[in-house]
């Protein structure tokens, strides 16, 4: 279709930008066509692509291709673009006097063109002092020069990133990170991207490196592979460190293609340099991301500070006993022995841990603690009052809501409490909490990094109560903070065992407790009033689920109360397919309905969706479930953008298309995501194909989400396997950090004989672990971690290895 060998292009003036994603620079706008080689004669055309700054009413040249969008028809998908330089005196005067350059009116613009001529722009780009004659003052002149050159640079950089194969999102992130220096940084060391830019992995950096001629065992390549592998492994396993031997082995095999005999030595050198640069930490043969290593130390030290700064309580034990009796009478409850002890300990200890399965009274105890604390400390239980200093928080929006409802007091997500945004900015946040009593619910979901920020924010003298169920799934992010704190036995802890929920017909809670004990009871697959099991293979799961859901209405369940929980996204019985299937059963498309799509997902009014990020400004948080109540198409609103209106439990939020990546369908969600939420009816499909995921804590977590009805579907053996297989503990060193900070002698490990003096290793290293240890032991300052602040130049005294 082109008239010449030139790439297809359009030259035209931008009329209206009607979509703009600030995160990835993706834009959609129309242009008034001035010239093209495509033969297009359809008038204005819609242009899409990722662009730096695009100014309306300005002229650009776009290269790319015409595509046929299934819904919007023919558009021009631009891969590169260039702002047309204003041409001739008239255009140049209009350019300089435009709104882009405040302070320059028509007179001054004329003066610029008269003085610098028609190549004024080039002259300014080459010589930042070219405009000095205008005598606008240093700052103003500089602003104008920067504006002109930044337009110029952004275009160049994005063009080059596109050539390097980066899509719009990554290009934007890279550009935001390095700015004008992007191209220099990339050519110098493309692997630095792995460290600096989220979303760039080793493979991507490696492809770029290859184009730049960096291959084989180049130290930069080794460094990139090491750092990426550590991140990959900790996120995959949930451990806070990686075994050094394993790391060297795995990285070695990635780089194998060009391996040389001394690759191993080079890997160790690479590791040492990363330690020197403060990116990784090595200790006892284990390799940590610096941030995770620091977080563990920081947690331990904060806990110690909180413990040390607690000066005891101002009231007598007798007063507490009396108050508890009063509360029992007010709440009409008689606490059992362990519950009573839990309340007493939480009121008298600086840090108290409370764990228990469903129905053991955790919420009941939180209520008692709050009431007793307020009374004993003469604090009004009125959040508006100046003296009120209790903070209640949980890791998810739903859990926080539950906490708020059951206490009648304000409760919020930990992110909100700390003023975190859930974005990369949080890395630099240093929040401070001014409460006197802090209670965290669903503590098992809190990961190492979040707990570090939370506990660092606590001020001396604050009392802390951490509540959760240690047998549930651990946090999504690395670490198992709650389990580690309990296992350390450093803090007073109560494990609640008695089930108090009084419902005669309820067998779900007992089932959950049996599962937790690893007991495969005879009755598990028998039908009861509140639970049943349907045996079928994975192929039949979608069909069986459709049937159950169609009939759930007859049993009095609204679809909002029915939640399907599954372990994995892929597969016939996976979350993605089940969402698709269920949506077509409960909310099918009909010819007159509105429907919008994002990727493979279609959205209709009434669809159940889940929010995937934290947006405190809209009061919606990760994991919250809502319903689509409105679809406003681009042509129906002045913003010219498709919008979804979603009702999150009374909080209506409007999401522009660019934000739709923050939601997904929620008829079926992952068991991991369901933590901290409860549902009237839970349908739980488990099949043998998911064997990699099937563990006791997964099944236990899923079953404990069901309040009134639980329907288990799938392979009987998949359920049995889940009950039998306990997940292995995550590897962390938080407990050891706590022991060190609290100066507690570490228990001897099993391999060491307590009677024998361990002789220092004198033989030649036999394996990677010893080599690594030797290398690193020479390199590491013996004070490493002792104060939680590891100086970045601690390798300065480094000896040659
Ligand atoms: N000592 C008690 N005597 C009588 N009833 C109790 C007692 N403790 C708790 N309960 C009741 O048992 C039920 C479960 O208690 P609660 O909700 O506090 O448990 P939980 O551990 O928070 O459970 P879940 O995690 O499932 O929410 C509630 O109805 C509560 O009123």
Image (cartoon, rainbow, N blue to C red):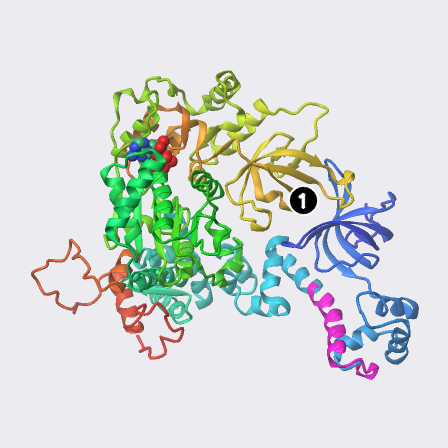
Please give left or right for residue 519 compared with residue 117 in the image: left
Q: In the rendered view, would you say 94 is above or below 683?
A: below
Examine the image and state in which quarter residue 468 appears: top left
The span shown in magenta is 132-154
Confirm whether the magenta stretch covers residue 436: no
Q: Residue at x 62, y 62 (%)?
A: 175
What secondary structure predominates along the stretch shown in magenta?
Answer: helix
Q: Residue at x 26, y 61 (%)?
A: 769
Looking at the rendered image, the quarter that the N terminus falls into is top right
Spot occupied by residue 348 in the image (x, y as percentages of width and height): 28, 53
Please give left or right for residue 110 compared with residue 346 in the image: right
Q: Nearer the viewer, residue 464 or 444?
A: 464
Residue extending furthest left?
755
Looking at the rendered image, the quarter that the C terminus falls into is bottom left
Secondary structure of the residue carrying tag 1 is: strand
Examine the image and state in which quarter residue 589 appears: top right
Label 1 crowd bin: few (<14), some (14–19), many (20+), radius 10 Å: many
* Residue on which disc 1 sits: 656
Residue 694 in view here:
no
Q: Nearer the viewer, residue 655 or 134?
A: 655
Q: In the rendered view, would you say 672 is above or below 755?
A: above
Q: Nearer the viewer, residue 437 or 74?
A: 437
Where's ligand 1: which quadrant?
top left
Spot occupied by residue 487 in the image (x, y as percentages of width and height): 25, 50
Please give left or right for residue 746 compared with residue 4 in the image: left
Residue extending furthest right?
90
């Amino acid at each position: 279709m082109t008239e010449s060998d030139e790439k297809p292009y359009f030259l035209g003036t931008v009329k209206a930008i009607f979509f703009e994603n600030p995160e990835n620079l993706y834009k959609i706008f129309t242009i008034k066509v001035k010239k093209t080689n495509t033969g297009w004669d359809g008038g204005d055309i819609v242009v899409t692509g990722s662009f730096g700054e695009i100014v309306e009413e300005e002229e650009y040249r776009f290269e790319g291709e015409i595509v046929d969008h299934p819904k919007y028809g023919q558009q021009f998908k631009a891969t590169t673009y260039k702002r047309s330089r204003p041409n001739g005196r008239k255009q140049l005067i209009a350019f300089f006097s435009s709104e882009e350059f405040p302070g320059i009116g028509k007179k001054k613009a004329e003066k610029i063109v008269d003085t610098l001529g028609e190549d004024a722009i080039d002259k300014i780009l080459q010589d930042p002092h070219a405009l000095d004659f205008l005598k606008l003052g240093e700052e103003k002149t500089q602003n104008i020069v920067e504006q002109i050159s930044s337009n110029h640079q952004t275009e160049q950089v994005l063009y080059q990133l596109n050539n390097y194969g980066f899509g719009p999102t990554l290009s934007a992130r890279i550009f935001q990170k390095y700015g004008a220096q992007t191209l220099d940084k990339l050519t110098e060391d493309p692997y630095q991207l792995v460290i600096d830019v989220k979303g760039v992995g080793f493979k991507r950096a490696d492809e770029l490196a290859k184009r730049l001629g960096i291959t084989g065992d180049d130290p930069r390549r080794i460094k990139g592979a090491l750092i990426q592998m550590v991140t990959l492994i900790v996120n995959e396993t949930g451990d806070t460190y990686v075994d050094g031997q394993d790391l060297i082995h795995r990285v070695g095999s990635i780089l194998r293609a060009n391996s040389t005999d001394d690759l191993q030595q080079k890997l160790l050198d690479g590791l040492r340099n990363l330690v020197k640069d403060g990116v990784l930490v090595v200790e006892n043969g284990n390799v940590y991301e610096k941030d995770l290593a620091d977080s563990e130390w920081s947690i331990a030290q904060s806990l110690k500070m909180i413990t040390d700064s607690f000066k005891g309580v101002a009231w007598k034990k007798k007063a507490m006993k009396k108050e508890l009796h009063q509360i029992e009478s007010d709440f009409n409850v008689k606490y059992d022995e362990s519950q009573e002890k839990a309340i007493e300990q939480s009121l008298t200890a600086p840090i108290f841990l409370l764990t228990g399965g469903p129905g053991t009274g955790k919420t009941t105890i939180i209520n008692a603690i709050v009431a007793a604390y307020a009374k004993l400390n003469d604090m009004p239980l009125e959040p508006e009052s100046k003296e009120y200093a209790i903070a209640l928080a949980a890791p998810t929006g739903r859990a926080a809501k539950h906490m708020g409802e059951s206490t009648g007091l304000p409760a919020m997500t930990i992110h909100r409490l700390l003023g975190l945004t859930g974005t990369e900015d949080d890395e630099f946040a240093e929040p401070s909490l001014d409460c006197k009593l802090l209670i965290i619910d669903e503590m098992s979901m809190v990961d190492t990094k979040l707990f570090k920020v939370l506990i660092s924010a606590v001020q001396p003298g604050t009392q802390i109560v951490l509540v959760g169920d240690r047998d549930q799934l651990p946090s999504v992010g690395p670490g198992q903070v709650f389990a580690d704190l309990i296992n350390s036995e450093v803090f007073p802890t109560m494990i609640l065992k008695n089930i108090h929920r009084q419902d005669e017909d309820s067998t779900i809670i007992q089932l959950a407790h049996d599962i937790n004990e690893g007991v495969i009871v005879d009755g598990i697959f028998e039908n009861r009033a509140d639970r049943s099991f349907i045996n079928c293979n994975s192929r039949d799961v979608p069909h069986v689920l459709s049937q159950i859901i169609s009939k759930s209405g007859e049993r009095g369940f609204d679809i909002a109360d029915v939640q399907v929980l599954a372990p994995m996204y892929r597969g016939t019985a996976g979350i993605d397919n089940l969402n698709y299937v269920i949506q077509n059963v409960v909310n099918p498309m009909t010819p007159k309905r509105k429907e919008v799509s994002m990727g493979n997902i279609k959205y209709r009014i009434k669809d159940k969706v889940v929010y995937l990020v934290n947006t405190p400004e809209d009061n919606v948080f990760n994991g919250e479930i809502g319903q689509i109540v409105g679809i406003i198409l681009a042509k129906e609103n002045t913003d010219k953008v498709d919008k979804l209106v979603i009702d999150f439990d009374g909080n209506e939020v409007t999401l522009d298309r660019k934000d739709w990546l923050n939601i997904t369908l929620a008829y079926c969600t992952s068991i991991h995501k369901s933590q901290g939420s409860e549902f009237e009816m839970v349908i739980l499909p488990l099949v043998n194909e998911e064997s990699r995921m099937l563990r006791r804590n997964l099944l236990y977590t899923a079953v404990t989400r069901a309040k009134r009805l639980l329907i288990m579907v799938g392979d009987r053996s998949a359920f049995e396997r889940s009950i039998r297989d306990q997940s292995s503990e995550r590897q962390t060193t938080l407990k050891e950090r706590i022991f060190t900070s609290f100066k507690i002698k570490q228990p001897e490990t099993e391999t060491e004989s307590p009677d024998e003096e361990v002789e220092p290793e004198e033989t030649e290293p036999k394996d990677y672990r010893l080599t690594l240890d030797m290398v690193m032991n020479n390199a590491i300052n013996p004070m490493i971690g002792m104060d939680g602040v590891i100086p970045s130049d601690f390798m300065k005294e480094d000896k040659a290895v």
